[in-house]
Amino acid sequence: MIRKAPLPGELLSRAFFETSPTLVAPRLLGKLLVHRTEAGLLAGRIVEAEAYRGPHNDPIDTAAHAHRGPTPRNQVLFGHAGHAYVYAIYGQYFCMNVSCEAKGQAGCVLIRALEPVYGLELMARNRHMHWTGSLTDRVAAQLTSGPGRLCQAMAIVRTSHNGVDLTSRRSAFQIRDDGFEVSEVLVTPRIGINPSNPALDWPLRWVIPGNPCVSGPKSLSGDRIFIP
DNA sequence: GTGATGATCTTCT
DNA sequence: GAAGATCATCACG
């Protein structure tokens, strides 16, 4: 029988995600988002993530899709943890989240940026970019810096991936730990929140400092946190 | 490098 | 009917 090549690292368990997104988001930094496609293996290291809290918290996170309770769009967020929540935004892009918390409670982590690791040429094709064969910092950022860009590069679309269990061995779409260690992260407010939103300044965005693929304004400041 | 603008369409009110 | 967890492009300094 034909045996598929082993995927890098170890699959993250559901327990990893069955807690507050404010704990999950920083822990996801350095992990691999992996997508096994017909055209080849795609994978990127998570370098930026944001937490969106469920409506059971006080005060309510009014920037979160789940803040008014379940709707047809956000129902995945109220199910089991570790599932992909993929939605369309601004008519032409997708954003990819991982559901957190126990079943019945919402909460998720938005994956905002990756550092490309596997399938670079295919990522470039997905992004309609010319592939030169060398991965400069600039090219890496053009591939997967930003939630819309990384979905395009990783071939993530709502119709195929919304609701997929990222913790299943059978899934072509997973998050894995290849042992990469992150010693220091930066916390900042989230990107793209409406200025009139009370949650505008909540420090719920985590990045790997200095990574070329981190999105958003470089001027955005935050606090450094050292992970023991 | 930074900042403004338009594209484009789904979702919820 | 309005807003939106964005991006590419263009002007400007």
Image (cartoon, coloured by chain):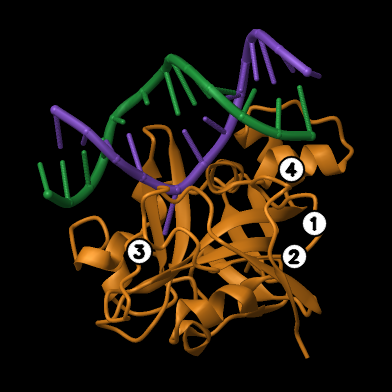
Chain colours: A orange, B green, C purple
Question: Mark number for residue A208?
Answer: 2
Q: Amino acid at mark 4?
A: Ala
Q: Nearer the viewer, residue A62 or A48?
A: A62
Disc 2 from disc 4: Cα separation: 14 Å
Which chain is disc 3 placed on? A
Work out whether disc 1 and disc 4 sit on a shared chain: yes
Question: Mark number for residue A141?
Answer: 4
Disc 1 from disc 4: Cα separation: 9 Å
Sooner in the amino-acid sequence: mark 3 or mark 4: 4
Q: Amino acid at mark 2?
A: Ile
Q: Residues within 10 Å of mark 1 (few under 14, many from 20)?
A: some
Q: Nearer the viewer, mark 2 or mark 3?
A: 2
| Residue topped by disc 3 | A163
Sooner in the amino-acid sequence: mark 1 or mark 4: 4
Q: Nearer the viewer, mark 2 or mark 4?
A: 2
| Residue topped by disc 1 | A211
Mark 1 and mark 3 residues within 8 Å of each other at the beta carbon: no
Mark 1 and mark 2 residues within 8 Å of each other at the beta carbon: yes
Residue at horizontal 74%, vertical 43%?
A: A141
A70 horizontally vs A129: left or right: left
- For the N terminus of chain A, which image quadrant? bottom right
Q: Amino acid at mark 3?
A: Gly
Sooner in the amino-acid sequence: mark 1 or mark 3: 3
Q: Nearer the viewer, residue A57 or A198?
A: A198
Image location (x, y in percent) of residue A78: 27, 74
Q: Nearer the viewer, residue A71 or A52?
A: A52
Residue at horizontal 36%, vertical 32%?
A: A91
Image location (x, y in percent) of residue A103: 29, 84
Disc 2 from disc 3: Cα separation: 27 Å
Residue at horizontal 34%, vertical 48%?
A: A159
